[in-house]
């Protein structure tokens, strides 16, 4: 049996849509148990966020993984099971897709923008952000390259 294409999987998924706060929100439930939630701006039809969730090994629902858009801040509530987390002041990379381009957005940069330089490594298929004082080097990869943070 042939593996279904992305379009076939999308068409076969159960879909729920609603309009709220100037956004079109669509929730997809795939046959394999995975879920995808997308939000679009009503005025521009631009994709604002895309999140994925799949069942964990015990069959419960897992956490949402952000593919496109700003990561959501955790709500105050019970303590997380994670004891070690990365600092909330670290730079955050996120992808933003528009009709004409793919964009990378970076939040929480600690220095003024004049301190940073951006280069593209064609062989590794990634963008490298460096500071002039060599304090930090970060890499944003296109998804299928093996670009590493140094």
Image (spheres, helix red, strand yellow):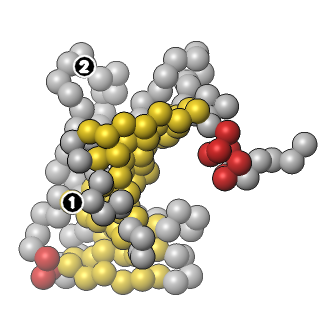
Q: Which residue is mark 2?
A: 79
Q: Residue furthest left?
A: 112
In which quadrant is the N terminus drawn? top right
> Badge 1 local density, few (<14 within 10 Å), some, or many (20+)?
few
Residue at position x 12%, y 63% in the image: 110
Q: Which residue is mark 1?
A: 107
Q: Nearer the viewer, residue 113 or 22?
A: 22
- In the visual, does 147 lie left or right of 106? right
Residue at position x 43%, y 37% in the image: 17
Q: In the displayed structure, would residue 37 be above or below residue 119? A: above
C-alpha separation, residue under disc 1 versus residue under disc 2? 25 Å
Residue 95, percent from left and from top: 38, 61
- In the visual, does 9 lie left or right of 3? left
Q: Earlier in the sequence, mark 1 or mark 2?
A: 2
Q: In the displayed structure, would residue 33 be above or below residue 116? A: above
Residue at position x 67%, y 31% in the image: 31
Residue 149, percent from left and from top: 40, 64
- SS class, disc 2: loop
- In the visual, does 30 lie left or right of 103? right
Q: Nearer the viewer, residue 15 or 69?
A: 15
Q: Quadrant of residue 108?
A: bottom left
Q: Residue furthest right?
A: 1
- Regarding residue 66, the answer to whether it shows in the image is no
In which quadrant is the C terminus drawn? bottom left
Q: Nearer the viewer, residue 68 or 14?
A: 14
Q: Quadrant of residue 14?
A: top right
Nearest-to-viewer mark from 1 and 2? 1
């Amino acid at each position: 049996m042939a593996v279904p294409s992305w379009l076939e999987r999308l068409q076969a998924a159960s879909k729920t849509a609603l309009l709220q706060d100037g956004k079109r929100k669509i929730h997809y439930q795939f046959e394999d148990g995975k879920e995808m939630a997308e939000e679009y701006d009503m005025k521009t039809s631009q994709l604002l966020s895309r999140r994925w969730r799949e069942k964990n090994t015990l069959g419960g629902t897992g956490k949402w993984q952000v593919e496109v858009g700003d990561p959501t801040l955790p709500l105050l509530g019970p303590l997380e099971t994670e004891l070690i987390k990365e600092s909330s002041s670290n730079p955050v990379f996120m992808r933003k897709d528009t009709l004409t381009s793919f964009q990378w957005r970076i939040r929480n940069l600690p220095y003024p923008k004049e301190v940073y330089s951006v280069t593209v490594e064609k062989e590794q298929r990634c963008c490298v952000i460096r500071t002039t004082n060599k304090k930090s080097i970060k890499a944003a990869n296109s998804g299928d390259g093996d670009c590493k943070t140094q």
